[in-house]
Image (tube, rainbow, N blue to C red):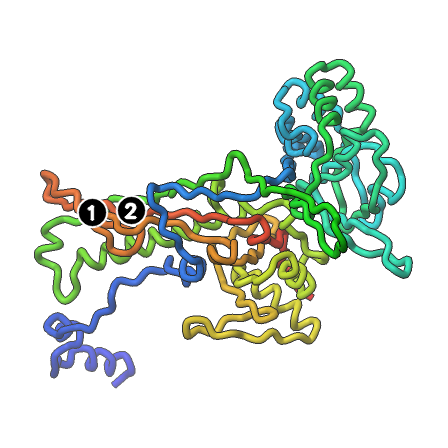
Amino acid sequence: MSVGEEIRTEQVRPQQSLATDAARNLATTTKSTPQMQEISSRWLLRRLPWVQVQGGTYRVNRRLSYSVGDGRVTFVKTGDRVQVIPAELGELPALRTFDDQEVLGELARRCEQREFAPGETLSSFGSQVDGVFLLAHGRAEKLGTGPYGDDSVLGVLADGSYFGEACVLDPEAMWEYTARAVTNCTVLVLPRGEIEQVAERADSLRDHLALLRAVPQQRTNKYGEREIDLSAGHVGEQEIPSTFVDYEPSPREYELSVAQTVLRIHTRVADLYNQPMNQTEQQLRLTVEALKERQEHELINNREFGLLNNCEYDQRLQPHDGAPGPDDMDELLSRRRGSKLFLAHPRAISAFGRECNRRGLYPESVEVDGNRVPSWRGVPIFPCNKIPISDARTTSIICMRTGDEDAGVIGLRQSGLPDEIEPGLSARFMGINEQAIMSYLVTAYYSAAVLVPDALGVLENVEIGRWR
């Protein structure tokens, strides 16, 4: 008998026991609850101190500050030509309150595009400031002179930065540092002479600049706040200065934001398929998880109150070598007291780990809520996949101090809502329609506030794709 005949004989043998497929129809299977891949650790929601907000609005009162106009400039690119958006020139301190769009457009058209190769000098210490430099793309270093005559890095400039703005009000302004390109840089330069020509022909700009020059210089501390006059170390009957603490006349108010959705469940499903798991509860559970994910995303990225968009310009740092290194993390920590946590995309944490390994450093981990998380200088680094990664494979690392008592970053919400299932989150039954479908309105109210500017810092343009 051939092999083929043996196979045919084996196939026609009668079944001698119950097949597993048929047995499964009568067996009680062990089931998992519905799973969802979108759920993340959401460390920001867990570690942010939440403040009860009655009335839906939270007002942040601060000391009066005179530092205005600290922002980034935005550009448009057409082929290899770069242009500054005219309204973005209002980010310069001297043009902060100037709103003549026609004049701003004329200034934007007079900007000269220049290209600098790595190592080239953009400005030289001690020379006269000949224009306002707008860094459209690239990275540059601000260099000073160290105690022994060597170069000392004072800061790093990146896309959207500007420098040399002092020449707008002071034609005799001098460069206090040297700016040198680290990478290929595309810069728009608005020459001082062009500003003067436009001011001669535009009465609005000439009057605006004249008014600013006539305002006496305000005495401020290093944070830009109005100085409080004090006297210390005196002897005898020296006259003691008098003072007062001035407040911002128009403090910022944060209104609670909202995230909502309508959950619909057919009554037939809720009535007949509630064993062994309650369908309504499971549907609501997954909906709440998705709502919380969106809530954390908004706390990071919202244009009004998101952390990335509400960090002050002087608290935004650039990595010295592109990749996030220990020196950059130290610089981020040094900008504030009592830093409580870092937030970084998991791929940024991996990039930081590679830099530490390259230097032979092994950061310790700390235990938080029963979980081991990486840390730097004892400050935990929490993963957050809501921090965006750009097409250029760059991202940001957030460092902040939290808490109302420490003048840090706080979360805002209002508890005690009707049909509340968690603080600040409610699920209200909306009834049953003519198609026998039940509806629940699921709502979350939330926001975030930065009580003082130095509570929040961001390390920007962190490169995550560099392998050595």
The residues bearing labels 2 and 1 have C-alpha atoms spaced at a distance of 8 Å
Amino acid at the residue labelled 2: Thr
Where's the N terminus, which quadrant? Answer: bottom left
Q: Does any portion of residue 193 appear in the rendered image?
A: yes
Q: Does any portion of residue 112 appear in the rendered image?
A: no
Q: Determine contact: label 2, label 1, CB under 8 Å.
A: yes
Q: Indicate the position of residue 334 as horizontal and vertical percent values.
A: 65, 60
Residue matched to label 2? 443
Q: Indicate the position of residue 433 as horizontal and vertical percent values.
A: 12, 40
Say left or right for 436 vs 204: left
Find residue 89 and name its label: none
Say left or right for 306 vs 36: right
Residue at 72% over, 54% down:
232
Residue matched to label 1? 428
Q: Is mark 1 on a helix, strand or loop?
A: strand
Where's the C terminus, which quadrant? Answer: bottom right
Question: Quarter of the image holding residue 203?
Answer: top right
Question: Quarter of the image holding residue 149?
Answer: bottom right
Foreground: 273 or 450? 450
Q: Indicate the position of residue 154 as horizontal and vertical percent values.
A: 77, 53
Q: What element carries label 2?
A: strand
Q: How many marks?
A: 2
> In the figure, 111 relative to 335: above or below?
above
Residue at 9% over, 51% down:
268
Question: Quarter of the image holding residue 233?
Answer: bottom right
Q: Indicate the position of residue 53 as horizontal and vertical percent values.
A: 36, 47
Amino acid at the residue labelled 1: Arg
Label 2: how many Cα within 10 Å (few below 14, some 14–19, many 20+): some
> In the figure, 411 relative to 9: above or below?
above
> In the figure, 161 relative to 48: above or below?
above
Q: Which numbered disc, 2 or 1, marks the residue that appears first in the sequence?
A: 1
Foreground: 250 or 208? 250
